[in-house]
Image (tube, rainbow, N blue to C red):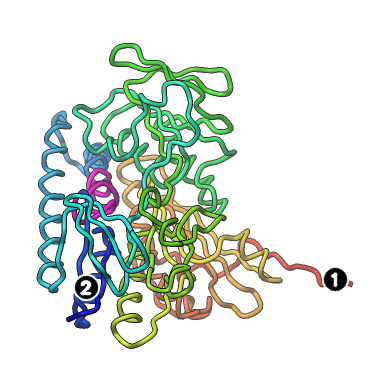
Amino acid sequence: MAEFDVDLFVIGGGSGGVRAARIAAAHGARVMIAEEYRMGGTCVIRGCVPKKLFVIGSHFRQDIEDAAGFGWTVPPAGFDWPTLIANKDKEIARLEAAYTTNVEKSGAQIVKSRAVIEDKHTVRLLENDRKITAKYILIATGGAPNHGAAIPGIEHVISSNEAFHLKELPKRIVIQGGGYIALEFAGIFAGFGSDVTVIYRGDNILRGFDEDVRTHVRGEMEKQGITILTGCTVTKVDRHGESFTTHLSNGSSIGSDQVMFAIGRHPNVANLGLEKAGVAINPNNGGIAVDHFSRSSVDSIYAIGDVTHRFNLTPVAIREGHAFADTVFGKREVRVDHANIPTAVFSQPEVGTVGLTETEARAQFNHVDIYKTMFRPIKATMSGRDTRVLMKLVVDGATDRVLGCHIVGDAAAEITQAVAIAVKMKATKADFDATIALHPTAAEELVTMRTPTARHVRQAAE
């Protein structure tokens, strides 16, 4: 008789948990995975995928407007929000079914229930109060929207979760936040025709990104008619029937049809039984504390993805889940390298970035060269749209290694994915220069910038 009911019990059916379950099963492990909502997790159901669909849909308005410059006569276009929502729901249902099928094909068993940890080897399924013993437990419960401190009227505020299911497109919307989600939804709603106001407490949006990127994105968004108010916060939300008044810390107020908060996400660690099992929380970020192999303070319990609050990106969770399964069940230690992770903000304009910002590089290296260009994309020369692309390389002046790449403009994410390979391989600026340009493209600028636009040399201490 087996000592445990299963070899691995996974809590959470998102991208990371699913990858871990499938790979562990492929290694011969007996796997059970519990999901209380829908298979696919945040990314598939209410995150990256539906968000990208909305971004694509909202961008057609610009495409239709730009067509005139190329000789097209387009009759007045109409947009129907319920059709978008219905078609999005169909696609998400298809993806959820695919996730379920792939897990089942791997040999892992899915249970539709919330699961809580009883001890280092036991979980309890709340659906039927059933206890399952497991040699290893993997926590992959992700994160959830965080509205911050309670304010009067907080109950009227929606998050990105609800934004995907609104019955109608708001004519006016106030969005608090200055990061990925806030700016992506600002572009989405503006693209569909909403009047958008962004509220952010800091001095500029996209905290943590390169300063040139932050400035450029803000300028481009404001050209599109999006109002960005920085240095203030929402202090109160009043409801008046179907409309709202948002009060700000600077004493002003804004009327709207919806108020959305996108100020961050917190790890889903509540009511999982972590304290009972002795699983430690990282005091610095509120996520489950883990080592380089995603092992928690309890040797039989691991955690991956957003619940650890390390790098809250879906591909990172997938890589961590795969590495966990290979390490624990594949008989080979695999450690995830979290350096030089590429990331994209699907704002409008789009941002793609990998490696160090200029500020980070100058803090770490004595000699930093900057190569930067801003130019009008070829499409805009005919459409007449007032927009510019930003491309920037951060280079170690001593070794010529490319430390970072930052792009703002159409296809920024697609370009950055390819550049990330070069950055990961520690390519030099000379390697970029030796690469023949692919013309006419925006990306060719990355291999044709020859002269530094700035040089920063730290003087040696005497």
Residue 42 among those drawn in magenta: yes
Judging from the image, what secondary structure is the residue with disc 2 in?
strand
Is 173 in front, or is 362?
Answer: 173
Which corner quadrant holds the C terminus? Answer: bottom right
| Residue topped by disc 1 | 461
User: Which amino acid type corresponds to the residue marked 1 in the rendered image?
Assistant: Ala
**Residue at (51, 57) in percent of width and height:** 373
x, y percent for residue 30? 19, 76
**Mark 2 burial class by Cα count in 10 Å: few <14, some 14-19, many 20+:** some
Residue 212 in view here: yes
The residues colored magenta run 38-56
Residue 439 among those drawn in magenta: no
**Mark 1 burial class by Cα count in 10 Å: few <14, some 14-19, many 20+:** few
Front position among marks 1 and 2: 2
Q: In which quarter of the image is residue 260?
A: top left
Q: Quadrant of residue 255?
A: top left
Rendered position, 378 above or below 65: below
User: Which amino acid type corresponds to the residue marked 2 in the rendered image?
Assistant: Val
**Residue at (28, 16) in percent of width and height:** 242
Residue furthest to the top in view is 240
| Residue topped by disc 2 | 6
Is 414 in front, or is 125?
Answer: 125
x, y percent for residue 351? 41, 53
Q: Main secondary structure of the magenta part?
A: helix
x, y percent for residue 279? 45, 62
Judging from the image, what secondary structure is the residue with disc 1 in?
loop
Residue furthest to the bottom in view is 331
Mark on residue 205? none
x, y percent for residue 247? 49, 19
Rendered position, 59 above or below 121: above
Rendered position, 239 above or below 44: above
